[in-house]
Image (spheres, rainbow, N blue to C red):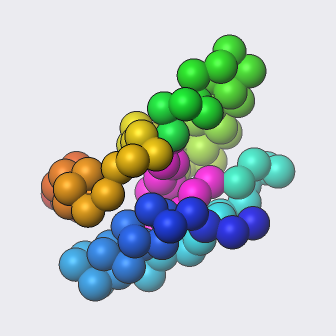
Amino acid sequence: MRSSKIERLIIIKLERYFKVKVEKQFKLQGKYYDFKFGNNLVELDGVYYHRTPKQLYNDRLKDTIAERFGYKIHRIKMAISDSDAIITANLKLLNEIFKG
């Protein structure tokens, strides 16, 4: 699976800003997560795609699997038009992950 442009930008910023190694497209119990670092799994949820009942069910299932295996799941809602401004804002959110 390929990472989206937004995912690649956030991963680059995470690795540079937080000095963590990010594993892209992490697979757990047959489900793929956008990326993993430490015991954190991050999903970038496009607001268009992640609004259908089927996708919402799949998201809840992935959250349950992640938690069952001891991971913290972080979902970041994004619009297709989001760019550096939203990435910067979300880095602040990710900063809280490292403090917590």
Residue 81: percent from left, percent from top: 39, 47
Asked if residue 96 shows in the view, the reply is no
Q: Is residue 76 magenta?
A: no
Quadrant of the rendered image containing residue 52: top right
Tell me if residue 91 comes above or below residue 11 in the rendering.
Answer: above
- Asked which quadrant contains residue 49, the reply is top right
Q: From what the image shows, is residue 11 above or below residue 68?
A: below
The foreground one among 25 and 77 is: 77
Give whichever of 82, 20 is nearer the camera.
Answer: 82
Q: Residue furthest right?
A: 30
Screen quadrant of the N terminus: bottom right
Q: Position of residue 40 (x, y in %)?
A: 45, 57
Q: Position of residue 72 (x, y in %)?
A: 45, 47
Residue visible at 68% across and 27% down in the picture: 55
Question: Does residue 31 appear anywhere in the picture?
Answer: yes
* Side of 17 relative to 65 (left or right): left
The region drawn magenta spans 33-45
Please report the residue visible at 82 percent of the width from the left and 51 percent of the height from the top.
30
Q: Nearer the viewer, residue 20 or 34?
A: 34
Seen in the picture, residue 71 relative to 67 is either above or below; the reply is below
Question: Can you give x and y, in whole percent of width and height, for residue 100 in the image?
Answer: 21, 51
Residue 39 is a magenta residue: yes
